[in-house]
Amino acid sequence: MAVSLDRMTDDLQAVTGELRTLMGDLVGRDIDSDGLAGALSQLLAPLADSGVNVEVTVGALDCDARVRSLIHRVAQELVRNAAKHSRARRVTLSVERTTGGTLLRVADDGRGFDPGSLEQLHREGHMGLRLLEQRVRGAGGSLEITSSPGCGTVVQMTLPLTAPPG
């Protein structure tokens, strides 16, 4: 039984790796054709179309393609969360170069939540933020969530300018 579980785990990890590669290729095309600012603006377009006031600011960046792809992927999940859960009237997304790295910040003025409830949400199967945090840590970065009920949410991701291989 343990050998079977090990094999299934290995197979699942291989499939997950292949899916990440495919998704990265798709994201890369958006970034290559529209630039990072254009690709990030596209993420917010459905919110703007629904009446949410959106703002995207992308500063001059000198980061590698893997970092740009990760910025896009994390922003995609954060914008999806804001659209699905926040009931925000305003969402801002900014990316800027910092000393030795890159900072992505997504903020909304929505209903917020108690970050202490994240463990319970994870147990209930809501894994999006946990998976993002793991992915960002794997790239040498960090993810910080600031929120409280009724006061909106701010998520900041910091990354080095180059992502480790993997």
Image (cartoon, rainbow, N blue to C red):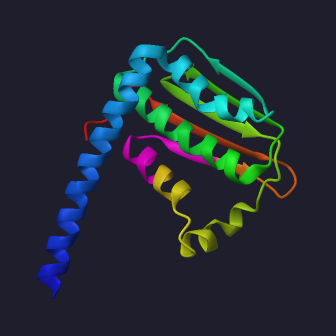
Question: Residue 105 appears at what percent x and percent y?
Answer: 64, 34
Instruction: Judge left or right: residue 64 versus residue 150.
Output: left
Q: Indicate yes or no whether the magenta region holds residue 138.
A: yes
Q: Quadrant of the C terminus?
A: top left
* Residue positioned most to the front: 49
Instruction: Judge left or right: residue 23 versus residue 98.
Output: left
Q: Indicate yes or no whether the magenta region holds residue 102.
A: no
Q: Nearer the viewer, residue 87 or 95?
A: 87
Instruction: Judge left or right: residue 89 versus residue 144.
Output: right
* Residue span colored magenta: 134-144
Q: Is residue 52 above or below residue 41?
A: below
Q: Residue at x 43, y 35 (%)?
A: 70
Q: Residue at x 76, y 50 (%)?
A: 86
Q: Quadrant of residue 120?
A: bottom right
Q: Is residue 67 visible?
A: no
Question: Residue 82 appears at what percent x and percent y?
Answer: 69, 46
* Residue positioned most to the bottom: 1
Q: Is residue 141 visible?
A: yes
Q: Is residue 63 above or below residue 157?
A: above
Question: Residue 51 appears at what percent x and percent y?
Answer: 81, 33
Q: Quadrant of the N terminus?
A: bottom left
Q: Residue at x 53, y 35 (%)?
A: 158
Count of numbered labels shown in the rendering:
0
* Residue positioned most to the left: 3
Instruction: Judge left or right: residue 1 versus residue 34.
Output: left
Q: Residue at x 66, y 19 (%)?
A: 57
Question: Residue 81 appears at what percent x and percent y?
Answer: 64, 49
Q: Is residue 55 above or below residue 145?
A: above
* Residue positioned most to the top: 60
